Amino acid sequence: MNWPLLSVVIPTYRREGVLRDTLKSVLQQDYPHFEVIVVDQTAAHEPETQALLEQLAAAGKITLFTVSWASLPAARNYAIERSKGEIVVFIDDDVDLPPGFLQAHARNYEQRPEVGAVAGRVFDRMKLAESDGLVIEELPPQAMDPGIAWYHIDLVHTVKPQPVLTARGCNMSFRRELFDRFGLRFDERFHGSAVREESDFCLHIRQTGLIIWYDPAAHLVHLGEETGGCHDISTRSLSYQLNFYHNHFLMALKNLTPLEVVRMGIKLFDCHVLGNPPCNKDSSLLKIVSRSVFYLLGLLYACFTLLTTLGRQGRIYAS
């Protein structure tokens, strides 16, 4: 098999030991043809981490870019425009890769020319001990409905390869054709945790005629560190709550039909505001009222974002 060149992109922000472990995991891959690009958004690292980054860069094992801002979608774009690979693989800075991870991604592109993106399986470390034995063969039809898919796509328990609507940002790859021929980029207006930025990008792939293919063989463990990362990990923070709803509505208003926006908004309210399954949130009146306020503010904020950034095509940071 003529293995294509892969660009493995790792955006990182305020990560130390877990970033070092992630880099070790990537560099141990036995794939014959890949580069590693690290986009570092950290103002100051611990000496051990900084020394490792500089050592790996000097040895040509990674290409290191240091930027002065912190934005996950902008870091992805920055790497896209500096990468060389025929396939661009995005992983987080807190993951553990099994042997053969890169081969699993690359194989899909060689075997299936209609594939424009590969969504890998993600095992969340904090949930591994809570495995309930659930096994999904075929995702339900709702998982391909952009109005409600986000509550039916399970890329943890699904064991059969199949088309999907989106990928998880910590384990996804794309043909360069999407960037060069179709000009797709990640929208840098997704703030905070950048939740739904990858879903927004994946929805644009529908316009190209290519598909997103889920391959459970391309799996990794997401460590889910509670410190660092390109977001505020505390779901109790005001900014997190506001950006969470802002990003959902931004994705919907950009990509969905009016009816799909309404259906998405209803499901978002039912799950994340009222706390019904699968969210299972605190259903006390005070919590519901508080979340309702952020829900409304998030909708207004998304409308404001769209109105004030017309013509910028989602680009905010320097490329």
Image (spheres, rainbow, N blue to C red):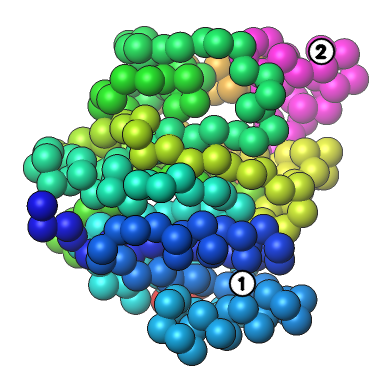
Residue in the picture at 72% in, 14% down: 280
Residue 141 lies, with reference to residue 79, above or below; the image says above
Q: Is residue 127 magenta?
A: no
The residue that disc 1 covers is 41
Find residue 218 and report its horizontal and vertical position in percent. 36, 39
Name the residue at the bottom extreme. Answer: 58
Q: Is residue 285 magenta?
A: yes
At mark 2, the secondary structure is loop
Residue at left 70%, top 38%? Answer: 297
Number of numbered discs visible in the structure rendering: 2
Residue in the foreground of this view, choosing between 122 and 149:
122
Q: Residue 283, which numbered label?
A: 2
Q: Is residue 156 visible?
A: yes
Q: Note whether 219 is above or below 78 in the view shown.
A: above
Q: Do callouts 1 and 2 mark residues in contact (Cβ within 8 Å)? A: no
Q: Nearer the viewer, residue 289 or 317?
A: 317
Q: Which mark is residue 136?
A: none
For the point 26% across and 34% down, the residue is: 213
Q: Is residue 269 above or below residue 125?
A: above
Secondary structure of the residue carrying numbered label 1: loop
Q: Amino acid at mark 2?
A: Ser
Q: Quadrant of residue 37?
A: bottom left
Relative to 197, residue 14 above or below: below
Quadrant where the C terminus is found in the figure? bottom left
Q: Which residues are magenta?
A: 272-298
